[in-house]
Amino acid sequence: MRKPGDWMQNPTDERILEVLNTGLELGPTTIGRNIDRDRTGVSRRLSVLAEYGLVARVDEGYYVITALGEQYLDKELDADELEPDNS
């Protein structure tokens, strides 16, 4: 069983990570279309997931999953133990 953080909004955050786990660089519009969520909401969640290190912004409007994100999906990481990077 995956261990989400109290800060996560599931199932949306997990679905975003699952779509990014394809290895593609994707933006919020494409992700939203594939998980039946609106672009604005996905964009907000991507920002939060990036703060906690589960995704990384690689270009204007494009994101990839990080090693931490993959560990979370593989049930190897307790997301409640992550701290936001507000730098």
Image (spheres, helix red, strand yellow):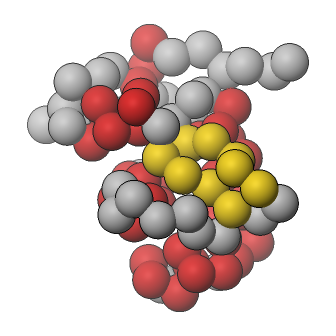
- Spot occupied by residue 44 in the image (x, y as percentages of width and height): 73, 56
What residue is rendered at 51% in x and 17% in y? 82
Side of 2 relative to 53 (left or right): left
Question: From where the camera sits, is residue 9 visible?
Answer: no
- Spot occupied by residue 54 in the image (x, y as percentages of width and height): 51, 36
- Residue 21 to residue 75: above or below: below
- Spot occupied by residue 36 in the image (x, y as percentages of width and height): 48, 84
Side of 15 relative to 58 (left or right): left
* Quarter occupied by the C terminus: top right
Q: How many marks?
A: 0
Q: Quadrant of residue 71?
A: top left
What residue is rendered at 58% in x and 81% in y? 30
What residue is rendered at 33% in x and 39% in y? 70
As rendered, which of 35 and 53 lies closer to the eye? Answer: 53
- Residue 46 to residue 19: above or below: above
What residue is rendered at 56% in x and 42% in y? 55
* Quarter occupied by the N terminus: top left
Residue sitting at the far left: 1
- Residue 13 to residue 33: above or below: above
Q: Quadrant of residue 50?
A: top right
Question: From where the camera sits, is residue 18 visible?
Answer: yes
Side of 17 relative to 84 (left or right): left
- Spot occupied by residue 86 in the image (x, y as percentages of width and height): 81, 21
